[in-house]
Amino acid sequence: MRLWLHELRVEQLLYWRSRESAFFTFLLPVLFFLILGAIYGGKTIKEEGGLKASWFLEAGMIGYGVAATCFAGLGISLVIRRESGVLKRIRATPLPPTTFILAVLGSTFLVFLIEAAVIIVIGKLLFSVPVPNAIGSLFVTLVIGALAFAAMGLGITGLVRSAEGSSAVINAVYLPMAIISGTFVTTKSYPGFLKAIANILPLTYYTKLTRDVMIHNQHFWHDGSAIGVVLVWGAIGAAGAIRGFRWQPREA
Amino acid sequence: MSAVSVRGLRKSYGEHEAVRGIDFEIRAGEVFGLLGPNGAGKTTTIEILEGYRDRSGGEVSVLGVDPQRGGREWREKLGVVLQSSSLYPNLTVRESLRTFGGYYTRSRGVDEVVEIVGLGEKANARVRTLSGGQKRRLDLGLALIGDPELIFLDEPTTGFDPGARRSAWETIRNLRELGKTVLLTTHYLDEAEQLADRVAVLREGAIVREGKPSELTGATAETEIRFRRNGEVVIERTKEPTGRLHELIHEFGGTEIDGLEVRRPTLEDVYLELTSE
């Protein structure tokens, strides 16, 4: 526990020190919410049953945020640390590998929870989006998302070979996913092929889940099949992590 | 008691045998050098001792523990410097030391280690702003922060300019005064000569010579005699240079022998001969 707390503090220091990762994974979803909310937050979306765009965006940016922090940010930073030899070096210390991974996950979840809180506060203060009623359900929803996407983030590290390629490969996966999954725009007006892609992506279901909980005050368990899809993707990520996660850089 | 004991160590990668049955002992408090050219098996050997790689055969004991089964308590007593620098660029020197110090139940003071590795002026500088030599010294500091009994140094000065090497040597010499056992790999002969109490020369996965650096030249070394006969350079190698010179003086009838040189082989010559047969 002492070691876990020590490493959690180290991870927080490393995260906020790295301006690139703090900007792209923490700040960008917040900025998009501010900008898009200012542009069309007051309009209504007829495909979503006349829902106000700011409400729609708030939950969407939390979905985008989980993909940015827990999937992309986690994956990219671990690949960079692996290829720079730091992960290998850590293995030579008495810090147990599980404690290290749990601290990395804890730190990532903390960043995501802060991000979600900032988005909710901005929504309330600037766009008059009410704070969700079902706070307990929202919290569980956030944790489920963080777990599933972090598992995918750990899993994808095995597919990325070099530090230089890490942001390119991972951004190429998660940016199109974020857009197609309907975090920014409603999927209801999509052409058929795009809908078909959206229907297999985990973020589509996760975004729906957050909207149901945040906007419609549903319990997190009301849509079991959406949770199921998110967790199946998380399990695929975890299996990939168990098979492909490496501590050592590629041999030169 | 030996700090490190290696018996018949083997390591194969597929068909390729990187280490072919080597033996050596390192006594507590000793600085031991593994010397050899690139690809001789130095890093493979040191990484087996550090617990990074599993061996294919033989017996290995590091501080009384088989590295393949080494746990947390064992790691508390080890310091490791990997072949390439492994640091967080965004942390300062002091933060890096505090980070790694936190992994050990008993660690040295951050300021003390900063002094030992000579980074006093850079203590609050970000790692990304350090020179290559300074980064390497921080690697050494991270290996020392847990106050280890045994330190592994894998090519600690490769790529340094001469000044940086001298100051790194100074730091490594301090380790001996701290009573640490050190295993050092290097492909520089002068480094082994400067730092190690004993050296094993590794070539293609086998130890070809072992002993004190001064003993490496050994009895087999032949002296080289060069001179010109009828304008042509003649090079001879002999174990009895004085006798051979007598003959030559006789042969030349006491006249000046053109271009005469008599040379004892340097350690460098012996090393090159040992490693490039």
Image: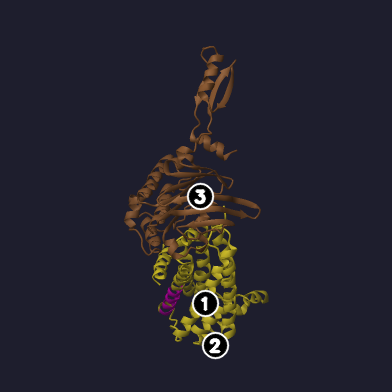
Chain colours: A yellow, B brown
Mark 2 residue type: His
Mark 1 residue type: Gly
> x and y percent of residue B66 in the render?
50, 60
Q: Is label 2 in a helix, a strand or a loop?
A: helix
Residue at image location 57% in from the left, 57% down from the top: B55
Give the magenta range.
Answer: A112-124
Using the image as rendered, state which of residue A73 and residue A103 is in the foreground: A103
In the shown orientation, is residue A190 left or right of residue A207? right
Q: Vertically, is A107 above or below B30?
A: below
The chain ID associated with circle 1 is: A
Q: Is label 1 in a helix, a strand or a loop?
A: helix
Single out the mark in the foreground, 1 or 3.
3
Q: Vertically, is A211 above or below B209?
A: below
What residue did someone put label 2 on?
A222
What residue did someone put label 3 on?
B24
Q: Quick one: label 1, few (<14), some, or many (20+) residues within 10 Å?
A: many
Classified by dominant secondary structure, the portion drawn in magenta counts as: helix
